[in-house]
Image (spheres, helix red, strand yellow):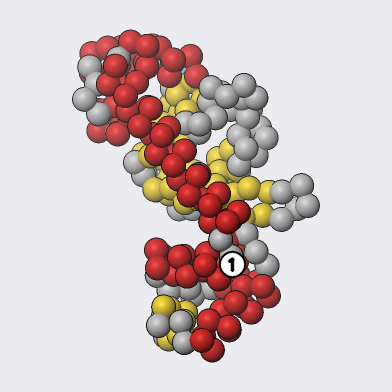
Amino acid sequence: MDEEIFELPLFRNCDRSTVGGILGRSSGRFASYRKGDFIAMQNSACRSLLILCEGSVYARMTGSDGREFTLDTLSAPDVLASAFIFSTEGIYPVTIIANTDCRLWIVGRECVMELIERDSAVLHNFLTVLSDHTIFLSNKLNQFALQSLTSRLLNYLETNGPVRNLQETAFILGVTRPSLSRVVSQLVRQGLVRRSGDGYTLA
């Protein structure tokens, strides 16, 4: 059993003997991915918990009309698929792609169930991860459903800093590049956004 597992948030304050024994008997494994590799595909079966140990990934969703947008970017250490692994449908609602070279520990659903049943710290940590991800999704829904593109762009600039690539940012915000370009131009004219050597930033 690799000791680094116990440094991950999911296993913080756990009983190492209990958790190590369960993981040692499981078919869990480490997997490495290169930047751009597909880790999980939207609508594919979700039977394992993906624990991101190194690197970062992003979750992309594709609509029925073919439009795509980036739902989130996650960096290690983090847990992927926490909200999907015990769902009734048992599928990934998003595609997970390696944003950088990354390394994951893949743990089967039955093993996760045993871990949370046998160790209260793991249960607490898992519920915390699940709750945090739910809050994030609620905030994301607020951005997309209740805010205008102008508000979403201003919030993005405040949170993430300069926009250097309009095409990439349009993909993240789930809009077309021409739509984003029009909003950026309008904000520049209004003096709320300025263009600098770093890209578009808040004025």
The residue positioned 50% from the left and 19% from the top of the image is: 109
Q: Secondary structure at mark 1?
A: helix
Instruction: Identify which residue is drawn at 68% across, 49% down.
Output: 62
Number of numbered discs visible in the structure rendering: 1
Left or right: where 194 falls relative to 5: right
Asked whether, in this view, residue 78 is left or right of residue 151, the answer is left
Is residue 41 visible to the viewer in this orientation of the structure?
no
User: Depth check: 134 or 56 in front?
Assistant: 134
Q: Is residue 197 above or below residue 29?
A: below
Could you say which quadrant of the image residue 52 lies in? Answer: top left
* Quarter of the image that includes the N terminus: top left
Q: Position of residue 34 (x, y in %)?
A: 49, 48
The residue labelled by disc 1 is 149
Q: Amino acid at mark 1?
A: Leu
In the depicted structure, whether residue 195 falls above or below residue 136: below
Location of the C terminus (image quadrant): bottom left
Q: Is residue 119 visible?
A: yes
Extreme residue in the front direction? 146
Can you tell which quarter of the image residue 42 is in?
top right
Relative image position of residue 5 (x, y in whole percent): 30, 29
Other residues around mark 1 within 10 Å, as few (<14) / some (14–19) / many (≥20) = some
Which residue appears at 58% of the width and 38% of the height?
40
View extreme (right): residue: 65
Which x, y percent locates residue 128?
A: 35, 32
Q: Position of residue 136 (x, y in %)?
A: 45, 45
Q: Residue at x 48, y 49 (%)?
A: 139
